[in-house]
Every structure is written in C-alpha cells, then in structure tokens.
C-alpha cells in the first residue's frame, strides 16, 4: 500500500495562472511542492515564468512584462500530479487536498461566485459596514493615508473611499458563500473571524498601500508617505498566513473559490493542531501524575532511612 499513488490533474492554463499570480517561493510553500519541482514542470510544459525582479516591480506599481502562454505547445494539456497515500511526506497530500477541495467547491452548481455590480440584499455585517463608511465619509479625520477603516465592532475593511463599494460587494459575496457552505462570520471587538467547524479564523480585507517619497522644495531632505494603490487584498491572519490580492491576471473576485478552499483547509489545520496540543497536554499531566506518585511513595522510605 505504501507505494500506491492516486493521480490528480491540473490543466496547463491553470498552472500558468498560478505561477503568474504570485512568486514561485510562495507557491512552493502554499502547495507543498519544491520550488525546483515547479520550475521543472513549467519547463516541461512550456509554461513561461516571471522574470527576475517581476514581483518587486509589481510591489512598487512599475510596469512589468507578462509573457503569454504559448499556444503552439504540442504536448498534453493536462498535468498529472501524484498524491502520496501512505508512508511519504505530507507535501503532495497538501497539494492534492487543495486542488481536490477547490475542484469540489468550484463545481458546486448551488454556489454562484459572480460578484454583482451593485450591492443587493447585503448580509447584516455588510449593511453595518456600509452605514459606517457613509458616516465616516462626513468626518474630517476619517481618512488616513488615503484610506478609511471600519470602526471597532464592524467587519474589518480598509480601503480608499472610491473602492468601498467594490470591497463591500466582494466581502458580501464571500460571507454569503461561507454561509452556504455551513460556516459563519462574526466580529469580536475590532477583529473579524470566519467560523468553520467551531474553529475561528481571523480575516480582513484591505487595500494595499505604496510608499512614496515627498521632496521638500528647496531643502535637500525629503519624507516618505503611503498612498492607496487600488489593489484589494483578502488576508487570512492565521499561521501560515495567506494573502489573496489583485494581479495583472486575476482580480480578487476571480479568486473567491480559492479563498473559500484555503479557509476550510486552515480550519482543518487549526483543529488538528489543537487536538495534537491536547494530546501532548494530557501526556504531560499523566507524566506529572506518575512523578508525583513516585515522590509520595519514596518519601516515607527516605524518612525511615534518615531515622535509622
């Protein structure tokens, strides 16, 4: 049984979208496959990779060269990955888990992933956030570094005023899909949690900021500040942390199935970690109990020896 493998498939286009959506090192950690292994697969299937410095340029909103996927590739369109069943490391299990669950969620006909152009029948948390933003827009000091942040007790969103509508619609769609999957979203003070199988996962939606240099006229010195970029990001603030954001190839809206998949897998990991922690704690208590019993048993004997 140790050598049996179950094959899963991902299309060439899907892998191309992945390697252009985030750095190779990030993908390697996220999908539990080696950086070198991913590069070899891409080379075999003639999938171009971002050039050196690509992600740094994106970070500072500089122009980058995106190489299109060659259409003249004569090989197979699907890429086979092998899931390790037993006796092997957890790496391929992780990549299999993600793609299996992503496929399950994406193909669920009861789920609609399209984010509407207008907010319609919003969730209560989104209605509260909308009212909060409307109120803040009238406040003089509500905008800091070009963005507004929802108040304490409101779902966590930080964006420029012109992007509040889009942010609310994205978050509303995520909440509704999570509830369809049997989960929930709650707010505790200033922290937003997704609740999946009794496990709480911290999340937030924000707009990425870019650092700029501000020269001071005739003086030689300058200062730095931050300005909004228009790039929206959905962050999962649990270890290992994960961030989904707008790219040249994929909008945040298009990544919602992946967000749902990652949240459910993070919940499973938290549950496993808690169970393992409880097992270690019980083992520690049992060990202490045995040690205390030995001490109690040996004390009378030591007293007798001392008085002898």
Image: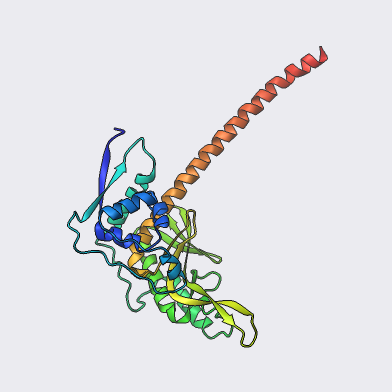
Q: Position of residue 293 (x, y in %)?
A: 65, 25
Camera sees residue 278: yes
**Number of marks drawn:** 0
Residue depicted at x 47% and y 57%: 241
Vertical arrangement, residue 96 with respect to residue 156, above or below = above
Which quadrant is home to the C terminus? top right
Of 283 and 187, the residue lying toward us = 283
Of 308 and 149, the residue lying toward us = 149
Of 151 and 158, the residue lying toward us = 158
Q: Residue furthest top?
A: 308
Q: Residue furthest right?
A: 307
- As drawn, is 200 to the left or to the right of 15? right
Q: Position of residue 24 (x, y in %)?
A: 39, 57
Tell me where residue 26 sits by quadrant.
bottom left
- As drawn, is 13 to the left or to the right of 199? left
Of 92 and 166, the residue lying toward us = 92
Tell me where residue 190 sits by quadrant.
bottom right
Q: Residue furthest left?
A: 74
Vertical arrangement, residue 67 with respect to residue 81, above or below = below
Q: Position of residue 228 (x, y in %)?
A: 49, 77
What colouring style does the render use?
A: rainbow
Residue depicted at x 43% and y 78%: 163
Residue depicted at x 37% and y 50%: 36
Q: Residue furthest bottom?
A: 218
Camera sees residue 108: no
Which quadrant is home to the N terminus? top left
- As drawn, is 161 to the left or to the right of 79? right
């Amino acid at each position: 049984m140790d050598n049996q493998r179950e094959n899963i498939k991902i299309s060439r286009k899907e892998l191309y979208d992945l390697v252009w959506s985030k750095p190779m090192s990030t993908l390697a950690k996220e999908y539990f496959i080696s950086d070198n292994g991913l590069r070899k697969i891409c080379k075999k299937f003639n999938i171009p990779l971002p050039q050196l410095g690509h992600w740094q340029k994106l970070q500072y909103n500089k122009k980058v060269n995106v190489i299109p996927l060659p259409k003249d590739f004569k090989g197979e369109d699907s890429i086979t990955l092998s899931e390790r069943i037993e006796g092997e490391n957890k790496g391929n299990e992780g990549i299999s888990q993600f793609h299996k669950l992503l496929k399950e969620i994406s193909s669920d006909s009861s789920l609609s992933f399209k984010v509407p152009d207008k907010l319609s029948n919003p969730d209560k948390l989104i209605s509260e956030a909308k009212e909060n933003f409307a109120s803040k827009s009238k406040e003089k000091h509500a905008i800091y570094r070009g963005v507004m942040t929802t108040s304490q007790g409101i779902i966590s969103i930080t964006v420029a005023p012109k992007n509040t509508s889009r942010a609310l619609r994205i978050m509303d769609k995520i909440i509704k899909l999570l509830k369809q999957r049997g989960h929930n979203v709650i707010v505790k003070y200033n922290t937003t949690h997704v609740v999946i199988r009794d496990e709480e996962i911290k999340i937030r939606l924000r707009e990425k900021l870019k650092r700029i240099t501000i020269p001071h006229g005739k003086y030689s010195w300058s200062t730095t500040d931050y300005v909004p970029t228009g790039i929206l990001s959905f962050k999962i603030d649990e270890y290992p942390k994960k961030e989904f954001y707008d790219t040249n190839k994929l909008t945040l809206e298009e990544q919602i199935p992946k967000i749902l998949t990652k949240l459910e897998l993070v919940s499973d990991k938290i549950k496993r970690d808690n169970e393992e922690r409880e097992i270690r704690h019980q083992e520690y208590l049992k060990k202490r109990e045995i040690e205390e019993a030995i001490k109690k048993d040996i004390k009378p004997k030591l007293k007798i020896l001392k008085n002898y």
